[in-house]
Each structure stands twice: as structure tokens, then as C-alpha cells.
Amino acid sequence: MQYKTHLAVTYAAALPMLVSSDSLTIGNLVVLGVGALFPDIDHPGSFIGKRLPIVSDSMRKLFGHRGIVHSLIGAVFFTAVVRFLLMTFDLPIDWATWFLMGFFAHLVEDSFSKHGIAWLQPIYNKNIQFGLKQVYYTTGGGSELAIFFVASAILIYQIVQIDLFAQLTFPFLEIQNVVNQIKNTYFI
């Protein structure tokens, strides 16, 4: 799955949780997004891999793409590293929770790819495909594009419904104005 689809699906799924738990902050949104992209650190061509090429290349050589980074053990390990860093730099510890949520969402999303992922690596290396080989997407294919558009539409609807930009201090007022225009045109 491409980074934009991971972000759209993750945010569409997590935004109601952020709102209902009174956790809607820019910091939580950022770490959720980082968590949603992080498992692809093992692919040098990924969004995050291109930005951290030395780390990405090393991870790919050590574990391969969709190796241990795409597993529950990887999720727990990297969340522990993030938690340690947050404690070290006296940053909000709940960011680790939202990082894990993004990471976990990525794993679920990749489980619907044609080949799935090996959730239980290194204990059990067989890939698990949630769609039972009947429901799946191919990265960059038409089915992924459809997923992206549906998730984006859901996300836009949620943003308008919760009036996201009124709840957050957001420096890009132009975006808020566009959202307000959409809201006034289509939802009022």
C-alpha cells in the first residue's frame, strides 16, 4: 500500500477514537501518521525510506521488506523505543500509544494486500492474508486507488462533521477556509 493510502485509511479509522477519547491534538495526529508509515522503513523506495535512506537500507538488508518490522514483535519493539525516546526527551508519553495505533493500523492494512504479512515473525513465518485470498488489493492498483478515495471521502466527512480546524490551533488558515467553503456548500 502506498503511503497516501496508509495515511488516509489510518486517519479515517483513528479520528473517531481521537475525538471520543478527547485526545485530538496535533502531536497525536503527527505520531499516528509516523506510526502508520513506520513499518515501511524496511523499503528504501517508501515515503519514510526515502527520507531515512541509511536506516531503511540497513533494515532491508537485516530483515527484508515485510520482515520482522511488519510483525507484532516489531510493533512492540519499535513502540518501546519510541516510549524510551519520549521519556528521555520529556515528551508526552501518550504519543507512544498513538504511534502504536498507527503502526498496528499499517499491519492490518497490509494484511489485506494480495500476499498479506507474517504477523508472528520470527516465531511463525507464514503470511496471513485477512481477505482469505478473495478480498485483496495490489499496491498501486485500481483496488488501492478505490480504497484511497473511499477513505479520503470518509476522512473529509469526519473533518467537516467535527469541525476539526476549530478544535486545533492550525497555522494554515487557507486550508481551514477551503474546509469551511466545502462545509457551507455541501453540508449546510
Image: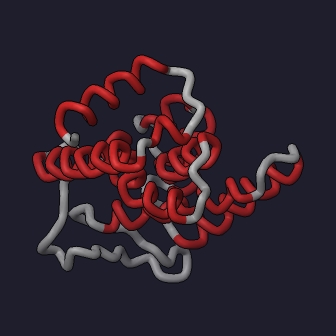
Relative horizontal placement of residue 137, taking residue 156 as reference (left or right)? left
Q: Nearer the viewer, residue 67 or 186?
A: 186
Q: As displayed, is residue 2 above or below residue 124?
A: above
| Quadrant location, the C terminus | top left
Residue 85 in sight in this render? yes
| Residue drawn at point x = 56 percent, y = 22 percent | 171
Give above or below for 81 relative to 30. below
The residue that appears at 43% across and 64% down in the rendered structure is 107
- Say which quarter of the image contains residue 51: top right
Does residue 13 appear to the left or right of 93 in the view shown? Answer: left
Q: Can you name the residue that lies furthest to the top here? A: 174
Q: Is residue 42 left or right of residue 99?
A: left
Q: Position of residue 102 (x, y in %)?
A: 51, 56
Q: Nearer the viewer, residue 51 or 6?
A: 6
Residue appearing at x 27%, y 44% in the figure? 152
Query: Residue 5 location, x and y as percent?
Result: 31, 46
Which one is nearer the viewer's eye here, 52 or 174?
A: 174
